Image (cartoon, rainbow, N blue to C red):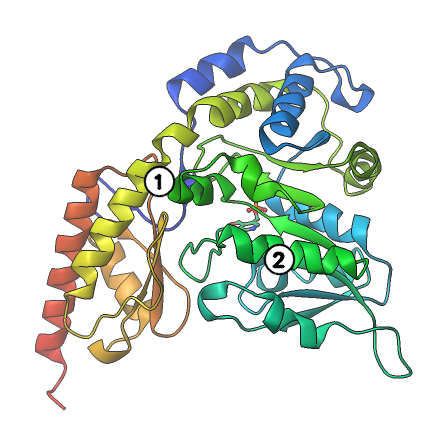
Amino acid sequence: MPERVIDLRSDTVTKPTPAMRRAMAEAEVGDDVYGEDPTVNRLEERAAEIMGKEAALFVPSGTMGNTIAVKLHTRHGQEVICEARSHVFNYELAMMAWFAGCVPRPIQAEHGILTWRLIEPHIRPLGPHWAPTGLIVLENTHNMAGGTVYPPDVFREICDRAHALGLRVHLDGARLFNAATFLGCPVHELARGADTVMFCLSKGLGAPVGSLLVGSRDAIAEARLYRKRLGGGMRQAGVLAAAGLIALEQMPARLHEDHRNARLLAQALAEMPGVTIPHPVQTNIVIMDISATGISAPDLSARLKTQGLLINPTGSHQLRLVTHYDVSETDCVRAIEIIRETLRSVRGQVPAA
Ligand SMILES: Cc1ncc(COP(=O)(O)O)c(C=O)c1O
């Protein structure tokens, strides 16, 4: 593999910035299980403030934040409505069954964006044969639908209608700052209406570890107990929170660069023979469909890797490219060249149909 590797597998691969490393080294710390870590406390206060909620809880991962949220809002034997390609349904090891005793009710939606019209027919009361609906989970941006963004009115309608029926809404906002950047609005406007929101510091915002769960004071007090039960009670976690504060305060302002790089990739890929881009590219994720090129996604991924370009397949003929702090525009131009040349050499090997 060449010395310089361009890693477009995910925005989770970013390394802490020099400012983060300095802040980590200098962080004031205490025992957070006793609530005595001043840096964690500051991070939680700022997160709640920025998201327009009463309180926040620092958790080690987005998966833990979502797991706690589902548990908070449901009882055993209920259904959780979510989108068919959502992270909570597909990539969290059946956590809603494992920890909360719930089953998902996945609904397919164009570009991953659910609407009240799609959700309403699936809402169930307790019946002789049915599990009742306990919760709705929405994902903004939608990872596997190519980083798509909920139109705020669509999101708010779902929240309002759900609340009118006594149902709660949890927002998996792992990349909510990307959505806010795309829409050009403050992030709290996209959190409004959701009962709880999970967002990640360790993706586009570049922190090494951590996510936050925000919501009402009561919900977060209960969430703290579930975090402990899951083994997520961290002690001198201020060393992580210090990097998280920089991620939260400074990194959202540069997300537009990742979005610009994603558009650059998408435009060039769309012009390659046999390649389509099935979802609008609004943020930092590009799904690339290569069904008409004659090779499979795992095969292309393996060939690109030998040339120092890392891209994950997400299906037999789809791959996902994610831009982030550690890839530049120059890297993206180089990535385009590598993909173009690789597909060209493959076309040379595949007999014409
Ligand atoms: C939309 C979404 N939600 C939740 C998560 C889980 O985050 P973590 O990897 O920190 O558990 C991810 C991770 O990629 C994600 O993309």
Label 1 sits on residue: 324
Q: Secondary structure at mark 1?
A: loop
Name the spot of residue 300 as percent of width and height, x first. 26, 66
The residue wearing badge 2 is 157
First along the sequence among labels 2 and 1: 2
Image side of residue 108 versus residue 149, left or right = right
Estimate the x, y position of residue 302 in percent, counting from the top left. Answer: 29, 62
**How crowded is the residue under tag 2: few (<14 C-alpha within 10 Å), some, or many (20+)?**
some
Query: Dot 1 surroundings within 10 Å: few (below 14), some, or many (20 or more)?
Result: many
Give the residue type at disc 1: His
Work out how far the residue at label 2 is from the one at label 1, CA to CA, in angstroms.
31 Å
In the rendered image, residue 18, in percent from the top left (x then y), is placed at 38, 18
Confirm whether residue 262 shows in the render: yes
Q: In the rendered view of the protein, which quadrant contains the C terminus?
A: bottom left
In the rendered view, tell whether residue 262 sits above or below residue 42: below
Q: Residue 81 placed where, x, y %?
A: 68, 66
Which element type, helix, strand or loop, lies under badge 2?
Answer: helix
In the image, what residue occupies the spot 84% across and 35% down? 218
Kindly report which numbered mark, 2 or 1, lies closer to the viewer in this rendering.
2
- Looking at the image, the residue that sits furthest to the left is 348
**What kind of residue is marked 2?**
Glu
Q: Nearer the viewer, residue 57 or 343?
A: 57
Judged left or right of residue 325, residue 125 is right
> In the image, which disc is placed on residue 349?
none
